[in-house]
């Protein structure tokens, strides 16, 4: 591991830790740790002359750790299994409605602005996790790179404004909050909502996985109809 890679890893961890502290002290969508730490990292890298190519090895190491982190979501799922089973039916209908709404609204917005069919296909998968989004985008004629960008934007905005918007709308039930964020903001939103509590994190993680499966099954035949 070279010096730049080590520096990039330390920078990323430190920026996220600092962003977490600031989020506790100054609660605001703009202090959401995922967003604020991203801004800090970009500013430091730009100021130090470290390019994205230089940062890539560090990114790959940290991305590898996403696997164990995702598996770790099974722990809160197990601890909250009784609640999940009890509310499985309403959760199914809520997830179905939420997933269809994100797909339809994304496609209709791209058509409203007269964007290309490939852009519409790429936007349609914005609310599922990146690996699934890339593969489904390919299946329906989208651009995988553009799909990944839409996924990142949806996750970032979901993490920043999702919990705040739910609070404004007086949605206080932990189960409903987790289901909403997991359905629309995948892993980035889940990383944010889990800070509210283990139940929110468990439901969001389950919704993220279920939404990905549902989207991959439904979108190939639904997209041509839109």
Image (cartoon, grey):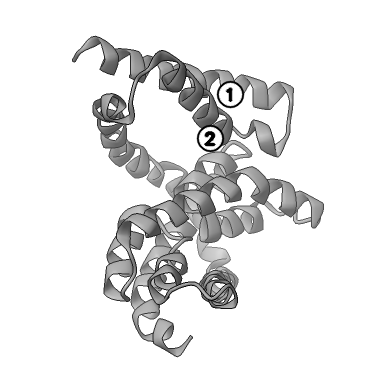
Q: From the image, tell me which residue sits under label 2.
A: 34
User: Are the residues flagged by discs 1 and 2 in contact, CB closer than 8 Å?
Assistant: yes
Vertical placement of 18 versus 140: above or below?
A: above
Q: Nearer the viewer, residue 44 or 213?
A: 44
User: Alpha-carbon neighbours of circle 2 within 10 Å: few (<14), some, or many (≥20)?
Assistant: many
Q: Nearer the viewer, residue 146 or 101?
A: 146
**Residue 13 visible in this rendered orientation of the protein:** no
Q: Position of residue 181 (x, y in %)?
A: 58, 54
Disc 1, SS = helix
Q: Position of residue 219 (x, y in %)?
A: 39, 77
Q: Position of residue 64 (x, y in %)?
A: 26, 35
Vertical placement of 114 versus 48: above or below?
A: below
Q: Is residue 189 left or right of residue 222?
A: right
Q: How many marks?
A: 2
Residue displayed at 37% across by 17% down: 49
**Residue 27 visible in this rendered orientation of the protein:** yes
């Amino acid at each position: 591991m070279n010096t730049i890679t080590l520096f990039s890893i330390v920078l990323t961890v430190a920026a996220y830790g600092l962003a977490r502290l600031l989020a506790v002290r100054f609660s605001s969508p703009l202090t959401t740790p995922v967003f604020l730490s991203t801004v800090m990292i970009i500013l430091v890298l730009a100021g130090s002359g470290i390019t994205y190519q230089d940062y890539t090895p560090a990114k790959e190491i940290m991305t590898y750790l996403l696997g164990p982190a995702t598996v770790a979501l099974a722990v809160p799922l197990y601890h909250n299994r009784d609640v999940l089973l009890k509310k499985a039916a309403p959760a199914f209908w809520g997830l179905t409605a939420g997933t269809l709404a994100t797909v339809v609204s994304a496609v209709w917005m791209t058509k409203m602005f007269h964007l290309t069919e490939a852009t519409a296909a790429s936007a349609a998968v914005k609310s599922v996790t990146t690996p699934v989004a890339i593969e489904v985008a390919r299946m329906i004629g989208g651009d995988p790179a553009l799909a990944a960008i839409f996924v990142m934007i949806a996750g970032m905005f979901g993490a920043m404004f999702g919990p705040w918007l739910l609070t404004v709308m007086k949605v206080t039930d932990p189960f409903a909050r987790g289901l909403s964020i997991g359905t629309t903001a995948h892993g980035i939103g889940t990383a944010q909502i889990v800070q509210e509590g283990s139940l929110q994190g468990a439901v969001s993680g389950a919704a993220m996985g279920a939404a990905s499966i549902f989207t991959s099954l439904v979108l190939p035949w639904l997209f041509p109809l839109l």
